[in-house]
Image (cartoon, rainbow, N blue to C red):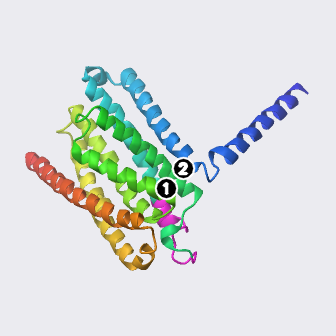
């Protein structure tokens, strides 16, 4: 009898919790705000967990300088965000019917859903947290190019989240986060003294391939998609149109500059092994 009452009580609390999440946390009007807070808190949680794990399980962690430990923790949050948003972006662009030309008569540039908005909000939360870290420890965690990259990304993603415009193109650009785990792993291997290891070389090749696909070829495809649907892009607000065109262009230039550095670095690594 007592067990039955406990089960009923538990189910009652569970129903209330589900109702709270559905009616408040995931209410359409609140999703942009709850998702941003979720993104910031997730970054904080990953940062703290990484610090705890590093202190407990990695002997090399204690030998790092203060700024190296901060970067170690910060890159873990960066990696987790990259995995999350890349997965969501790939699903939204290639698996979901939300942006399919054949599933709706609604303009492709104004389509959105609770899930797509939530995912973008989490990303906004990450960019806010990471930009704050970069500025606070400037220039230790990244120079002006990182500030520019994050500012453009933050404005574009936030606008898309709040307005519902251009979410397809925002997700296309966010697929470029595919390269982030490899870049972070390269840093981890470097500070761990494994720059001459086979893992470092393999990671370099993976970075080259993923960068070529996600930050060069995919951007070309995105511009082609914009060209094909430019009549719909023109119906967006002026600011939205500018973001759809200017932000990817700026990021493309930065991607090409970084790609040239990746090629030089890979060549140098391969030359040393011959």
Q: Position of residue 226 (x, y in %)?
A: 38, 73
Please identify the quarter of the rendering in which residue 198 is found: top left
Secondary structure beneath disc 2? Answer: helix
Q: Position of residue 112 (x, y in %)?
A: 54, 63
Quick check: 257 above or below 192? Answer: below
> Residue 201 appears at what percent x and percent y?
21, 46
Q: Would residue 212 be seen by someone viewing this image from the given angle?
A: no
171 inside magenta stretch:
no
Q: To which residue does mark 1 refer?
A: 161
Q: Residue at x 80, y 36 (%)?
A: 12
**Mark 1 burial class by Cα count in 10 Å: few <14, some 14-19, many 20+:** many
Task: Classify residue 89 by image quadrant.
Answer: bottom left
Residue span colored magenta: 90-105
**Disc 1 and disc 2 in contact, CB within 8 angstroms:** yes
Indicate which disc residue 32 carries.
2
Instruction: Name the one closer to the observer, 28 or 270.
Output: 28
Determine the residue located farthest toward the right in the rendered image.
1
With respect to residue 192, does 109 lie above or below?
Answer: below
User: Is residue 44 something that shows in the picture?
Assistant: yes
- Image quadrant holding the N terminus, namely top right
């Amino acid at each position: 009898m007592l067990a039955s009452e406990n089960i009923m009580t538990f189910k009652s609390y569970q129903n209330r919790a589900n109702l709270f999440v559905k009616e408040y946390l995931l209410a359409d009007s609140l999703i942009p705000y709850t998702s941003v807070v979720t993104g910031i808190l997730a970054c904080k949680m990953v940062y703290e967990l990484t610090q705890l794990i590093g202190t407990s399980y990695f002997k090399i962690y204690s030998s790092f300088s203060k700024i190296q430990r901060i970067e170690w923790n910060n890159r873990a949050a960066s990696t987790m965000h990259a995995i999350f948003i890349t997965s969501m972006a790939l699903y939204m662009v290639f698996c979901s019917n939300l942006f399919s030309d054949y599933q709706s008569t609604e303009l492709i540039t104004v389509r959105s859903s609770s899930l797509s908005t939530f995912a973008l909000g989490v990303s906004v939360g990450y960019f806010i947290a990471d930009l704050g870290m970069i500025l606070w420890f400037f220039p230790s965690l990244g120079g002006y190019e990182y500030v520019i990259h994050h500012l453009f990304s933050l404005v574009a993603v936030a606008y898309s989240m709040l307005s519902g415009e251009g979410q397809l193109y925002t997700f296309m650009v966010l697929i470029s986060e595919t390269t982030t785990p490899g870049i972070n792993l390269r840093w981890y291997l470097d500070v761990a003294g494994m720059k001459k290891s086979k893992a470092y070389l393999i990671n370099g090749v993976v970075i080259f391939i993923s960068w070529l696909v996600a930050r060069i070829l995919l951007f070309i495809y995105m511009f082609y998609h914009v060209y094909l649907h430019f009549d719909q892009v023109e119906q967006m607000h002026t600011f939205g149109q500018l973001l759809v065109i200017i932000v990817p262009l700026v990021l493309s230039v930065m991607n090409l500059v970084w790609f040239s550095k990746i090629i030089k670095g890979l060549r140098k690594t391969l030359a040393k092994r011959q």
